[in-house]
Amino acid sequence: MESRPRLSFWQIWNMCFGFLGIQFGFALQNANVSRIFQTLGADIEQVPGLWIAAPLTGLLVQPVVGYFSDRTWTRLGRRRPYFLTGAVVATLALLVMPNSPTLWIAAGTLWILDASINVSMEPFRAFVGDQLPPSQRASGYAMQSFFIGVGAIIASLLPWLLAKSGVANTAAAGEVPDTVRYAFYAGGAVLLAAIGWTVLRTREYPPEVLASFEDTPPVPVRGDGAQAPMVAAMAWLLAGLVLGAVIALRGWDRMLYVLAGMLAAYGALLLVARVLPPGGMIPSIVADLRAMPRTMRRLAVVQFFSWFALFAMWIYTTAAVAGVHYGSSDPASAAYNEGANWVGVLFAAYNGFAALAAIAIPFMVRVLGLRVSHLLNLWLGAAGLLSFLLVRDPQWLLLSMVGVGFAWASILSLPYAMLSDSVPATKMGVYMGIFNFFIVIPQLVAASLLGFLLKSLFGGQPLWALVLGGGSLLLAGLCVLAVPRIVVEEARA
């Protein structure tokens, strides 16, 4: 057997460049979709429910795309057909989103936009694991973080820059300002061009070559007990049904039905996997989920608390900054739109700091190791979000974004570096997709629970969602210490 060849700087650059476009679309979505929803008449309590499309599409799409991309080989390769297909559909959705005439059309377009971004994004994660030897994977994922930062800086700044250039930043009630519309048009063009560059400038190893490398972990052996016992499947299903009944009887927030639905759906999935013929897509994904490596299970907990915090920030920063720092919750007012544009600047700032952090992270890993580096970066992010409770001058919030930027760069790179060294190459796509469960499940929990918590405990003030996010990042940092040390040390070597 031979070792996987090391790639040059520019080869890694080309294979990661498409992430510039993916993040361009993702950043426009994160910074502006709440603004679009409120412009089209959504109340602040409705916004988390409308955002639920984003994590739900990831939950459904990414494992399926990972499963099929592991089994794909075409003239374009293994992962690149998915890059290109997702890019074309996402570009069309970016053109439609700011022109949505009604709230329900905007919500439906978000489903399509997020699904297509997910079709492109998850194969990119597996692409790095396919192409790079273990010693270069931290650098590969850090390069992706660099392009994520650069793309998000420009995309998040676009409405603010267009307003400074004289483009109208307000519009009639129910209409999206020109600054947002033109930013989305530019985002569609950049997304398609960047992914096209990666598709044209990279190559992939055929399946037989990929399987021959000596750094490829063995495929886990699953016996007859790979599928969940009937008792476990029924317990999950019953737990969801009981929780749904309690929510109905007590008249709790309807968004809590999402939690009940998640429990019941998991139980139903386990039951379906038991009755379908072995070897099919659903039984295979469920069996791989139950056969996750120990490292992956521990990282799942870290990811849960990390992404709960990020989703809280994406949903509520616009409302928090506009209301607290600019004194307006009216989406048609000049003050609200000025605050919303400043949130774009803040998001650009944290992505800019993330790009710088991506350069520093490989050096941090060499000195401190993967675990300690990730812990420190998560705690920097926690400090950044918690500081929103104290800072009242919006200019000083730029300092808060330093910590958020380091956490963001670390979340996008170090867990994947730890994960890719513990899963088999022939299942890299499906395991990256399954790993995405622990990104989207916390987002679904946040979408269903945050509105209820804010209304019940914090008087509906969106600022407290950011504080909850800061506490979640503190917990995520502590959970990093549970990741097996031996795997981390091997990855460093």
Image (spheres, grey):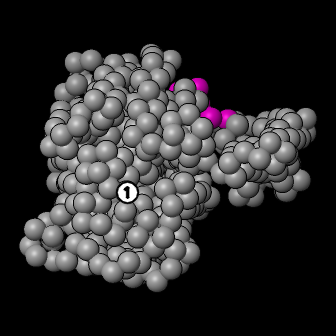
293 within the magenta span: yes
State the predominant SS element of the stretch in magenta: loop
Q: Nearer the viewer, residue 332 or 389?
A: 332
- Taking the spot 39% from the left edge, 44% from the top edge, the residue there is 313
Q: Position of 276 compared to 10: left or right? A: right
Rendered location of residue 404, percent (x, y): 29, 37
Rendered location of residue 274, percent (x, y): 86, 48
**Residue positioned most to the left:** 165
User: Dot 1: within a 10 Å radius of its alpha carbon, few (fewer than 14), some, or many (20 or more) residues?
Assistant: many
Residue 55 visible in the picture? no
Q: Quadrant of the C terminus?
A: top left
Q: Quadrant of the N terminus?
A: top left
- Taking the spot 18% from the left edge, 40% from the top edge, the residue there is 393
Rendered location of residue 421, percent (x, y): 44, 34
Q: Establish if 478 lies above or below 44.
A: above
- Taking the spot 77% from the left edge, 47% from the top edge, the residue there is 251
Query: What residue does disc 1 label?
Result: 329
Q: Nearer the viewer, residue 168 or 8?
A: 168
Q: Element under label 1? A: loop
Q: Nearer the viewer, residue 209 or 293?
A: 293
Residue 330 visible in the picture? yes
313 within the magenta span: no
Q: Which residues are magenta?
A: 291-295
Q: Position of 146 compared to 329: left or right? A: left
Rendered location of residue 173, percent (x, y): 38, 77
- Taking the spot 89% from the left edge, 53% from the top edge, the residue there is 275
